[in-house]
Image (cartoon, grey):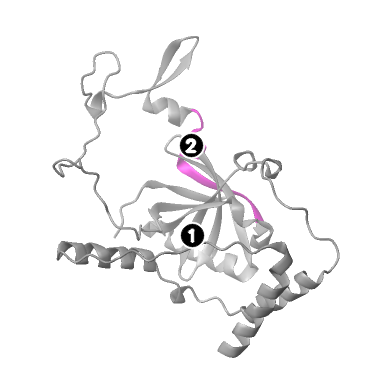
Amino acid sequence: MPRAIWTGAISFGLVNIPVKLLSAVKDSTLDLDMLDSRDNSNIRFKRVNESTGKEVNYKDIVKGYKVNDKYVILENDDFVNADVEKTKTINIQNFVNEKEIESIYYEQPYYLQPDKSGEKAYGLLRDALRHSGKVGLATFVMRSKESLVIIKPYEKVIVLNRIRFQEEIRDIKEIATPPVIKGKSAELTMATKLIDQLTTKFDISKYKDTYTANLLKIIKAKAKGKLKAAPKLKVVHTQSNDLMDALKASLGKRKKAS
């Protein structure tokens, strides 16, 4: 059972639901250590005083913000006092259609678990969200950072999914891309057909982290002294003049597979 990383309450109108925030994800990558190549000793990172070069104990570290070349030191109470309500409450401000939120805004999911005194209200909010088809849009503060979040049902739990503020998204004008195709070209028609052929019902269980599994196989083989030649892969770029040929071949290959 993961430990709670935040405790507070969901504010829903005049209803307050005491909850704990738990991580909804776990890392699937291998836990690799950094070693000194000369003797395979572990690399350790230390918190060092810039002036003395000496290591600093975590209990002696404070947070500060530089103003006019001097640091203003912040105490724990300062972070709470910046907005007491937001540090203790996930305040649902509006309800929206989830499909209106672009995927680029999504950041990190968490589970919300009710305290015993809030189980009935928790269940009511979860089931009302499912019945309405809407998600709650809320803000709260965790680890001295304000987050914009959506609240939605997932099976029998309520999920809090942190999303980014608009100012956190880079302007697409910074990205060099080809112009948007106007009208319906032969290539576009062919590409759409290929998309239709490859369209299936979404099933997350079909997709596995095969890279990590393969890397683990290599690690086990190396532990036994077995070395395997690395496969060579050459990236072939499709030129604009043979794009139609590539699309046709892809469609033909898909038909044969079917």
Residue 94 at least partly seen? yes
Residue 61 falls left or right of residue 9: left
- The residue drawn where x is 70% and y is 68% is 243
- Tell me if residue 105 comes above or below residue 168 in the rendering: below
Q: How would you rate the neighbour count of disc 1 (Cα within 10 Å): few for under 14, some for 14-19, many for 20 or more? A: many
Occupied quadrant, residue 114:
bottom left
Residue in the foreground of this view, choosing between 40 and 229: 229
Kind of residue at disc 2: Lys
Q: Is residue 254 positioned above or below 246 on the image?
A: below
Q: Between residues 231 and 55, which one lies in front from this camera angle?
A: 231
Please state the extent of the stretch shown in magenta in the rendering: 82-95
* In the image, residue 88 lies in the stretch drawn in magenta: yes
Quarter of the image where the C terminus is located: bottom right
Is residue 258 visible from the viewing direction of this image?
no
Is 21 on the left or on the right of 203, as rendered?
A: left
Q: CA distance from mark 1 to mark 2?
A: 19 Å
Q: Amino acid at mark 1?
A: Val
- Decide whether residue 204 is among the magenta residues: no
State the image coordinates of residue 220 (x, y, percent, origin top left): 20, 65
Instruction: Report the residue at 66% width, 81% height from top.
Output: 251
Element at label 2: strand
Image quadrant for the N terminus? bottom left
In the picture, measured across the screen, residue 235 lies left or right of residue 255, that is left
Label 2, residues with CA under 10 Å away: few <14, some 14-19, many ≥20: few
Query: 109 and 201: which one is in front?
Result: 201
Give the x, y percent position of residue 226.
Answer: 19, 66
Which numbered marker is on residue 145? 2
Query: Does the residue at mark 1 contact the one at mark 2 (Cβ under 8 Å)?
Result: no
Say which label, 1 or 2, has the lower sequence index: 2
Helix, strand, or loop for circle 1? strand
On the image, the x and y values in percent for residue 202 come to 55, 75
Q: Which residue is mark 1?
A: 159
